[in-house]
Amino acid sequence: MSLLEVKGLRIEFPSRHGVAVAVNDVSFAVSRGEILGLVGESGAGKSTIGNGIIDLLSPPGRVASGQVVLTGETISGYSGEAIRQVRGSRIGFIFQDPMTSLNPLLTIETQLVETIRTNLQLDEPAASRKALAMLQAVGIPEPEIRIKQYPHQFSGGMRQRVVIAIALSCDPELIIADEPTTALDVSVQDQILQLIRQLCKERDVGCILVTHDMGVIANTTDRVAVMYRGEVVEIGTTGQILHDPVHDYTKSLISAVPRADIKLHRFPRVEYIEKVQTTAIDVKNHWLGQQETFGELHDGHLLEVQNVHLKFETQSAFLKKKPKIRSGFR
Ligand SMILES: Nc1ncnc2c1ncn2[C@@H]1O[C@H](COP(=O)(O)OP(=O)(O)OP(=O)(O)O)[C@@H](O)[C@H]1O
C-alpha cells in the first residue's frame, strides 16, 4: 500500500467572477522513503495541492472532489481537531522562508520542545532530549549552545535546518517541502536538499518536494509529477522524466535548465507552444529577448514560452502593441 494516495483531486477558488479551478483531476501516490517532486511553472497549482492535502487552503479555496488517503485512511474532508492531529504529527511541513515558520521571540529549544510535547505526549525532559537529538541530526554545530539561541542568531541555511528538525521531530510519515531552498543562498541550497533527502531515506519518511526548478528535481527526487495549469501532464521516475520526457511541456522545462557544458550565444529557443485554437504559430528562429521580432501570429492564440508568458488577444493587437511579458526567467 502506498503511504499517500491522491485520487482525482480537484481544488477550486470560487469568486464573484466565477470559479477558478487551481487543481484538476490530479492523481499520484507517494511511498515511504520516496521523494516525489511536483514541478511546474508559477501558478501551475503545486502549492495548492500541498495545502489541499492538509486542509490549509487559503479561503475561499476548497477541495471540490477527489480523495487524499494516508496509509489507508481518507483524510480529505477532515477538519478541526481531526486534521490538526494529522498536521504536525503525521504530515510535517517545510515552507520556503524559514523566518515565517519560526517564532522570532522564542528560543529554538522552546519551539522544538513545544512541538514535540504537543504531538508526542512526552514529558519535558524527554522532549528536551529529543529536541537536542533533532538539532544534531540536521547538522547544527554545538547543538547544546545553539538550542538556547533565537532564530535571528542563525544564518538562513541554519534556520532552514531548524525548520527541518521541527518538521521531523514528531516522527511524521510524510513531509511536504514547498520550495524549501528558494529563499536561501545558492551556496547552501544543495546542502539543504541533500539533508532532506538523507533524513527521509534514513527515517523512511515520504516527501512531496514542490519546486519550479528542474535542477532541484534532478538532484533530489526519485519520481516526478510535472504540472501544467492545474493538471499532472506527466509522471515517472526522475530518470525517465529527465532523459525520456514525453510531453512537450516537460521537454521545455528541461531545456530551460542552464547547462555548464553548453555555451549559449543567444537566448534559449522558444520551446513550447500551446495552440488554443487551430492555426499554427510559427515561432521558429525567434528568440527570447527579441519579442518584437515575433512573426506569423494569428488571431486568438495564446503563446507560452517556458517561464515567459506572452499573450496576444488578436493579431491586430499584436501589431499595435509590444507583447506583454507577464513573468520572466527565473
Ligand atoms: N487564494 C487564492 N485565491 C484565488 N485563487 C488562488 C488562490 N491561491 C491560489 N489560487 C489559484 O491557484 C493557482 C495555482 O496557485 P499555486 O500557488 O498552487 O501555484 P504554484 O504552482 O504553487 O505556483 P508558485 O510557485 O508561484 O507558488 C493560481 O494560479 C490561482 O489561480
Image (spheres, rainbow, N blue to C red):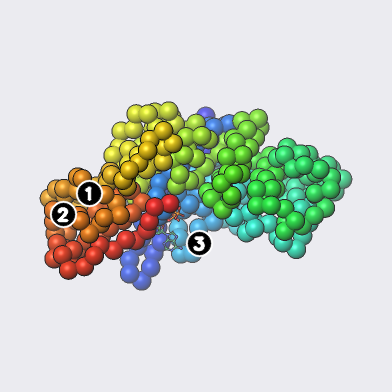
Residue at point 63%, 33% (across, down): 198
Marks 1 and 3 in Cβ contact (< 8 Å): no
Marks 2 and 3 in Cβ contact (< 8 Å): no
Q: The residue under label 3 is which amino acid type?
A: Ser
Compared to 122, does 103 lie above or below? below
- Disc 1 element: loop
Q: The residue under label 1 is which amino acid type?
A: His
- Judge by depth and name the residue closer to the eye, 157 or 138: 157
- Give coordinates of residue 180: x percent, y percent: 57, 48
- Disc 2 element: loop
Question: Badge 2 is on which residue?
Answer: 295
- Image disc number at residue 286: 1
Q: Is mark 3 within 8 Å of ligand 1?
A: yes
Which image quadrant for residue 291? bottom left
Which image quadrant for residue 129? top right
Compared to 128, does 151 lie above or below? below
- Disc 3 element: loop
Marks 2 and 1 in Cβ contact (< 8 Å): yes
Q: The residue under label 2 is which amino acid type?
A: Gly
- Count of marks overlaid on the render: 3
Q: Nearer the viewer's eye, disc 2 or disc 3?
A: 2
Residue at point 14%, 62% (across, down): 315
Question: Badge 3 is on which residue?
Answer: 58
- Give coordinates of residue 289: x percent, y percent: 30, 54
